[in-house]
Image (cartoon, rainbow, N blue to C red):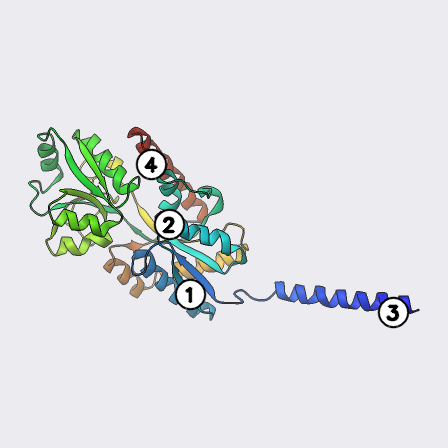
Amino acid sequence: MKQTKLWRAVALTTGLSLSAAAMAQQAPWPVKPIRLVVGGPAGGNADSLARLLADGMQKQLGKPVIVESKPGAAGVLAVNDLLANGKDAHTFLLIQGGIVSETPLAYKVSYQPFKDLKPLAQLSRNGLVLIANKDFPASNLQQLADYGKKQPDGLDFASYATGMRGHTSGMLLGQLLNIKMKHLGYKGSPPALSDLMGGHVPLMMDGLTTSLPLIKAGKVKALAVNYPTRMVQLPDVPTFKELGYPQLAEVSWFGVWSRPDIPADVQARVREIALQYFKQPQVEARLRDMGMESGTDASSQALMSELQKAYQHQQALLKSIDYQPQ
């Protein structure tokens, strides 16, 4: 009899434990504050976008959303944070698509780009612009080609990071114009732009966000953009595509990412909030001020397919200049 009572007690305790576990599993997400890890410095583009997204998520979910900047190593530190802490579906990443299509080719990374990360939503789109020192003797692409062919030692050009799109786009431009381009890699746009304005380097392929204020102020001049269409912020600047160089028509974008193994309903909820919030007029206006456009509603699968093509394109360009990951 005592043994029977003991088994009943064990069964009751086990049942209560299982019931508590089931209730915990059914608790509505999120059950605690959400972390939004940023692959860039505080005050940068990704950080600004993350704070916009955090505002939208807090309003919809009723939980705090904490933005944490993890700059360094071309975004790899932020990726590592997501992979280490994101399994509980309360840590997400805001970073450029290049973390999959560019960074693994330019630097040695420990993650598998097309397996370990999943883009939930594309938040914004932008492109690069070819800019020149204001006293540079060319003001359009044809003049650049003519001038460059007369320079036996070639033309220096700057980029914000070695091995990334600003680097390879400049090298491809040289190939297409049949002029020699010599790359100077910098650690970020600000020091490169400073040298450009100071006349230490004549050309640069830069993101519109950092270069737009300088273009508007007349401190540098824009020759062409690599976006597929003219940018609303620079309506008078032609695209490389319309100038006859469609190979240079590319799109860069920021998105919100997760680990691929978190619950599908959580992925869908974050995607829904992000897409709806970034289509609001006041948010779209803010993006335009930053030199960006609203993202598309492309699916995760479509975004990854796009990044796969970009990866192959970038890989071929880096191979053509015998680039080795750093």
> In the rendered view, does 324 fall on the left or right side of 119?
left
Q: Nearer the viewer, residue 275 or 287?
A: 287
Q: Amino acid at mark 1?
A: Ile
Quadrant where the C terminus is found in the figure: top left
Q: CA gap, disc 4 to disc 3?
A: 70 Å
Snapshot quadrant of residue 325: top left
Most distant residue in the right direction? 1
> In the rendered view, does 67 fall on the left or right side of 88?
left
What number is the disc on residue 5?
3
Task: Give x and y (percent) for residue 191.
Answer: 21, 50
Q: Which residue is mark 1?
A: 66
What number is the disc on residue 101?
none
Task: Give x and y (percent) for residue 226.
Answer: 23, 43
Q: Residue at x 50, y 53 (%)?
A: 84
Task: Give x and y (percent) for residue 287.
Answer: 28, 59
What number is the disc on residue 314?
4
Q: Amino acid at mark 4?
A: Gln
Q: Which residue is mark 2?
A: 75
Judging from the image, what secondary structure is the residue with disc 2 in?
A: helix
Is the C-beta separation of discs 3 and 1 under 8 Å?
Answer: no
Q: Give the mark nearest the N terminus, 4 or 3.
A: 3
Quadrant where the N terminus is found in the figure: bottom right
Can residue 57 be seen from the camera position used here? no
Q: Give the mark nearest the N terminus, 1 or 2.
A: 1
Is the C-beta separation of discs 1 and 2 under 8 Å?
Answer: no
Q: Give the mark nearest the N terminus, 3 or 2.
A: 3
Judging from the image, what secondary structure is the residue with disc 3 in?
A: helix
